[in-house]
Image: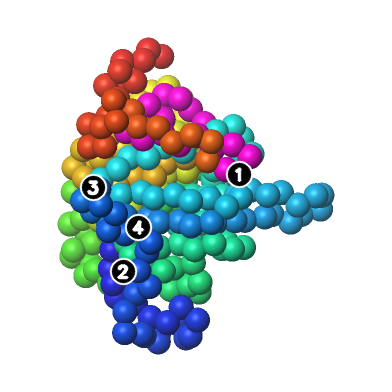
Amino acid sequence: MSHDAASGDRRGPDTASVPGPDPAPGAADAGHGSAPIVRAQGLTKTHHGEGAPVHAVRGVDLTVRPGEFVAVTGPSGAGKSTLLHLIGGLQRPDSGKLWLDGQRVDEYREARWAVLRRRSIGVVFQFFNLVSNLTVADNVELPALLAGASPKAARESRAELLAELGLEGREKSMPGELSGGEQQRVALARALVNHPALLLADEPAGSLDSKGTREVLRLLSRFHQRGQTILMVTHDARMASAADRVISFFDGRIADDAQLGGGHRGPAGGVSGVLELKE
């Protein structure tokens, strides 16, 4: 994760700096071999609307280490998407602390979160969130350009990703001309174009049919096998079984945290059986 994006005084102006980061508790836990990419401590978030307050996240502690594929499952309304949004800086916690790659980020302002997401965090949403009046090529290249890549480098990264995702020849298409599965593949390319340290996926197959779900599973598994760290929210057991660690989330809290595949933490997961599912 870029230290340029994450250095600085959390309470001062966005351009200020301090001598060093606030270390994450447990960042050098014995026996794990690597510092966590995500470390949350006591995160809370309450939504206030017309009715009674909704306690979406209630004092959550969470660690995600490099190379893990973690699925957060639970029923609708359990608070799992809110948790993902807190980790990605899309919402702010009411209390608690959050470190990304050893940098304390829970008090970052929006401008600094925007820079951090461009450089170090890729986000995939259920409804794709593509820019409807931009072509496929422009949707994928835009994050790279915003992160400071040259037009040539952005084009090269876009071409490589679209080819790998089976979207060659669709560069000039508009999002509305694509199927749901194709739109999600474009969204995945956009999320990965800057080679983020962390990929956040919020119900990435929630709007897709069985074929589209299998496509997304294959792609997530492929990038995970190459070392991509993934934190995914899903209510779909098929999607969760592609991960190598599954967290059950209920009523704003972690109810269970289990390793799949006999406790194996490496890239190989249980996706092969999932991909054999029939229509």
Which element type, helix, strand or loop, lies under badge 3?
A: loop
Residue located at (33% from left, 28% from top): 260
> Residue 201 location in percent, x, y?
42, 44
Identify which amino acid the numbered label 1 is placed on.
Gly
224 vs 134: above or below: above
138 relative position to 58: left or right: left
Residue located at (24% from left, 41% from top): 223
Residue closer to the observer: 64 or 229: 64
> Residue 211 location in percent, x, y?
38, 23
The residue labelled by disc 3 is 31
Residue closer to the observer: 259 or 238: 259
The residue labelled by disc 4 is 26
Q: Which image quarter holds the N terminus?
A: bottom left
Identify which amino acid the numbered label 3 is placed on.
Gly
Q: Is residue 47 magenta?
A: no
Name which quarter of the figure residue 67 lies in.
top left
Which element type, helix, strand or loop, lies under badge 2?
A: loop
Whether residue 238 is visible here, answered yes or no, is yes
Instruction: Characterize the local packing of mark 2: few (<14), some (14-19) or many (20 or more) Cα atoms within 10 angstroms.
Output: some
The disc, 2 or 1, on the residue closer to the chain's N-terminal end is 2
Instruction: Characterize the local packing of mark 3: few (<14), some (14-19) or many (20 or more) Cα atoms within 10 angstroms.
Output: few
The disc, 4 or 2, on the residue closer to the chain's N-terminal end is 4
Residue closer to the observer: 189 or 101: 101
> Residue 124 location in percent, x, y?
42, 47
Q: Nearer the viewer, mark 1 or mark 4?
A: 4
How far apart are labels 3 and 2 at the CA level?
A: 35 Å
How far apart are labels 3 and 4 at the CA level?
A: 11 Å
The span picked out in magenta is: 235-253
